[in-house]
Image (spheres, rainbow, N blue to C red):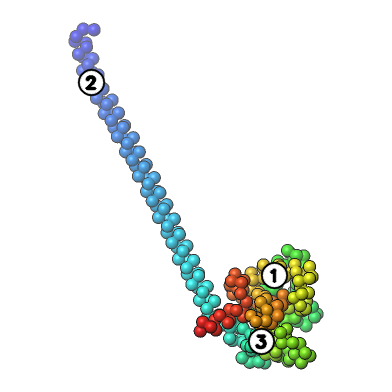
Amino acid sequence: MNKQKKEDLEMYLKPVLYVVIIILILGLVWIIWKYLQNNFEIKQKIILEKQEKQRILKEKKQAELKAKKEYENYIKNLDLESDDSITKFVNNKVHFTNIWYIPKDLVSVWAKHIIDGKWWYIKVRKILKENLEKLSEQFYKDTKNNVIIVSGYRSYIYQKGIKDRGCPDNLCAKAGYSEHQSGLAIDLYSASSEKNWSNNNNLKKYYSWLSKNAYKYGFTNTYQKWLKVDGYEIEPWHWRYVWEKFAKYLWKNKITEAEFYNKRKTEK
C-alpha cells in the first residue's frame, strides 16, 4: 500500500474510531448511570418498605393500646350494683337493692339443643337465652348432647320456700341474695354436689367442655373456689351470664366474680 493510500485510510478511520470510542464511553456512562439509578431505587424501595412497616407497626400498637384502654375502662366501669345490670353482683352478703326484684324480659329457656328439665317451667332473661342457644349449638356439635337446664329464674318467694324447707346457707342463698333471682343464672344437669360431678363421667365431660368454652358465650362458673372466696360451696352446675368481655376477663385471670367484686371494693 502506497503512502497516499495509507494516509487516506487513516484519515477515514480516525473519525470512525473516535465515534466508536465516544459510543463506548457513552455506553459505559449509561451502564454506570443505570446501575446507580437501580441501586438508588432499590435503596429507596427498602427505605419506603421499612417506613411502611414501621407505620403499620405503630398504628397496630396504637390500636392495641386504644383497645386495651377501652377494655380496661369497660372492666373498670362495669355496673355491679343496679338490679337490672347484666353484671349485678349478689352473694350471701350482698342482696338486690329491691329484694322483690323481677326481671322484665323473662322467656322460656327451651330451644333446639336446650331442654327444660322442668318441662316449660324454667324462665331466664332473654339475653341469657340468646347466648345459651349459641353455646348449646357448639356443645351439641362437640359432645352430641343437649344442654339440660334444671333451674333458672327464681322469685323472692320461690327462694324463700327453698330456704324454709331447710337448705343450708353454704348451699342455698337467702331470698333476695340469690343469683337466680337476676334471671341470669342457670343450673345444669344436676344441682347435686361437687363429689357427684367429680365421680360422674358424663358430668365431668360436660364441665370440662364448659370450663374451656363457656366464657366465649359470656358465661362464668360462679362458685368454684369454696365458701371463703365465693360465699358458697363449689357448684360445677351453676353458670351465670355476665357479657362475653367480662366472662373472658374472669376466665383469663382465673378469678370469680366474687373475687373481682371484693378487689374493686378494696380499691375504692
The 10 Å Cα crowd at callout 1, few under 14, some 14 to 19, many 20 or more, is: many
In the orientation shown, which residue stands out farthest toward the right? Answer: 119
From the viewer's perspective, tell me whether residue 74 is left or right of residue 144: left
Query: Which quadrant of the figure has residue 264?
Result: bottom right
Identify the mark at residue 244; answer none if there is no mark. none
From the viewer's perspective, tell me whether residue 186 is left or right of residue 80: right
Mark 1 or mark 2: whose residue is earlier in sequence? 2
Q: Find out whether the residues at labels 3 and 2 contact each other: C-beta distance under 8 Å.
A: no
Amino acid found under the numbered disc labelled 1: Leu
The percent position of residue 52, horizontal first and vertical second, equals: 42, 55
Instruction: Look at discs 1 and 2 and give the one toward the viewer.
Output: 1
Would residue 142 be visible to someone looking at this image? Answer: yes
**For mark 1, what is the residue?**
210
| Relative vertical location of residue 45 with respect to residue 249 in this rendering, above or below | above
CA separation, marks 1 and 3? 25 Å
Q: Find out whether the residues at labels 1 and 2 contact each other: C-beta distance under 8 Å.
A: no
Amino acid found under the numbered disc labelled 3: Asn
Placement of the N terminus among the 4 image quadrants: top left
Q: Nearest the camera: 112 or 145?
A: 145
Residue drawn at x 67%, y 76% as measured from the top left: 224
From the viewer's perspective, tell me whether residue 43 is left or right of residue 87: left
Query: Which quadrant of the figure has residue 172?
Result: bottom right
Would residue 184 be visible to someone looking at this image? Answer: no
Identify the mark at residue 92; answer none if there is no mark. 3
**For mark 2, what is the residue?**
14
Mark 3 or mark 2: whose residue is earlier in sequence? 2
